[in-house]
Image (cartoon, helix red, strand yellow):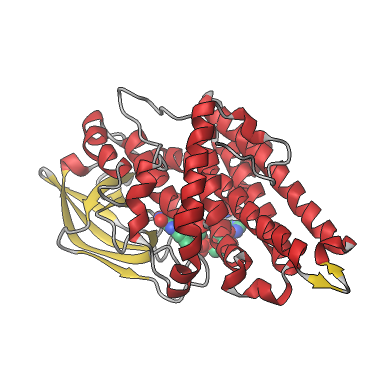
Amino acid sequence: TFEPLASDFYSYESLLNDRELAAIAELRAWLESEVRPIVAGYWDRAEFPAQIVKPLAELGAYSFAWDETKPFENSAVFRGFIAMELARVDPSVATFVGVQNGLVNGTLSICGSAEQRREWIPRIASGEIVGAFGLTEPLSGSDSAQGLRTTARRDGDTWVLNGSKRWIGNATFSDITIIWAKDLADGQVKGFIVPTSTPGYHATKIEGKVSLRMVQNADITLEDVVVPESHRLQNANSFRDTAAVLRLTRAEVAWAAVGTAVGAYEAALTYAGERVQFGKTIGSHQLIQDLLVKSLGNITASLGMVIRVSEMLDSGEQRDEHSALAKAYATARMRETVAWAREVVGGNGIVLDYDVARFFADAEALYSYEGTQEMNTLIVGRSITGRAAFV
Ligand code: FAD
């Protein structure tokens, strides 16, 4: 049975149908019993719990899959609620799913041929294999639309890839990595499905992260990596196609940002009801109530926004600037909210045992990835003024 979240102040969850509510309830119960108890330890050790990959598939977390018989069988709104639910327990788990489901299956759905979709999507959606999405490079982050240095050279029926990638999530253990590279012939960005066992492909874990420590990010080098033409994404002909994937996934990051804020707020609210100072629970003090209420306002406003942006995706109205505004707004509100939660929990707000510290640290990565605050602001700025201010 479905129990509404106390943080869902305006009952947004009532927009879901019975089947969706049942799925959320099942996912929530599993996250509480199997994931919440282990995440602080995995975060501390900077390890990823591989045992969750398949159960997540069974619980429908990789529901982005598209094929001819069931085009996007789940609505974007429902997928958003799933992303929020995952992040509410752990932002690293939401990020893992965001890569596997959004960036990888999203790319295959949008940029793959019918044959490529049939071959790869079910294997990703079932958790049989893990995917990664390699766009960012050591020398090209925000400017990846024009700044990619990784090259692809056509050689008969094959392509030869050379270059390097940075920050690629899941890539220390992925079975395939989608590599975006510039075609030396026409200068356009193209995408390639690269099995990670291909000679010349090397991934090294990025150590020392203080945010999303559970997510395994990698530096990748590609030295004369050869893939067949059948592994070139047949419907990715320029960066415009890459951007179409990012438009969808950015909106899901906005949902994960709301989930991160919810997780921190819930932990702070619980703490405020237990911790006693000056003879009463800190939740009885006016200034603490102020922090909690402002947090609830952030969550409630952001949730309304992400629901609407997903409805616009479902109805075919969503444009780049719509998801960019949602990502920029929701991550900014998340950053405020996790800081307020950390304040409510006082000194305990900086130790892993009280959850808030993990949300506080993890929020920083969500704030920067899939387009920084500045990049998403410039996308919206271009839309409302008609002037691009990127360079
Ligand atoms: P830069 O582009 O170097 O930007 C640095 C700063 O300058 C930022 O504040 C930026 O907003 C600002 N800036 C840049 N240009 C302008 C401008 N024109 N005007 C104003 N300000 C500007 N990438 C992948 O491809 N796959 C992944 O799986 C992946 N996972 C990630 C996971 C994590 C935890 C992190 C941290 C990153 C991940 N990334 C991934 C990369 C991520 O998308 C980039 O970090 C992000 O796009 C920003 O690029 P950058 O870090 O190179 O920063």
Q: Image quadrant for the N terminus?
A: top right
- Asked whether, in this view, residue 228 is left or right of residue 350, the answer is left
Q: How many marks?
A: 0
Q: Tell me, yes or no, if residue 16 can be seen here.
A: yes
Residue 216 sits in quarter = bottom left
383 and 277: which is toward the camera: 277
Above or below 328: residue 24: above
At x 43%, y 60%, the residue is 140
At x 42%, y 71%, the residue is 46
- Asked whether, in this view, residue 145 is left or right of residue 357, the answer is left
319 and 384: which is toward the camera: 319
Where residue 70 appears, as percent x and y from the top left, is 35, 24
Above or below 130: residue 64: above
- Asked whether, in this view, residue 113 is left or right of residue 24, the answer is left
233 and 333: which is toward the camera: 333
20 and 384: which is toward the camera: 20
Where residue 110 appears, as percent x and y from the top left, is 36, 34
Q: Tell me, yes or no, if residue 247 can be seen here.
A: no
Where residue 258 appears, as percent x and y from the top left, is 62, 48
Where residue 311 appears, as percent x and y from the top left, is 57, 29
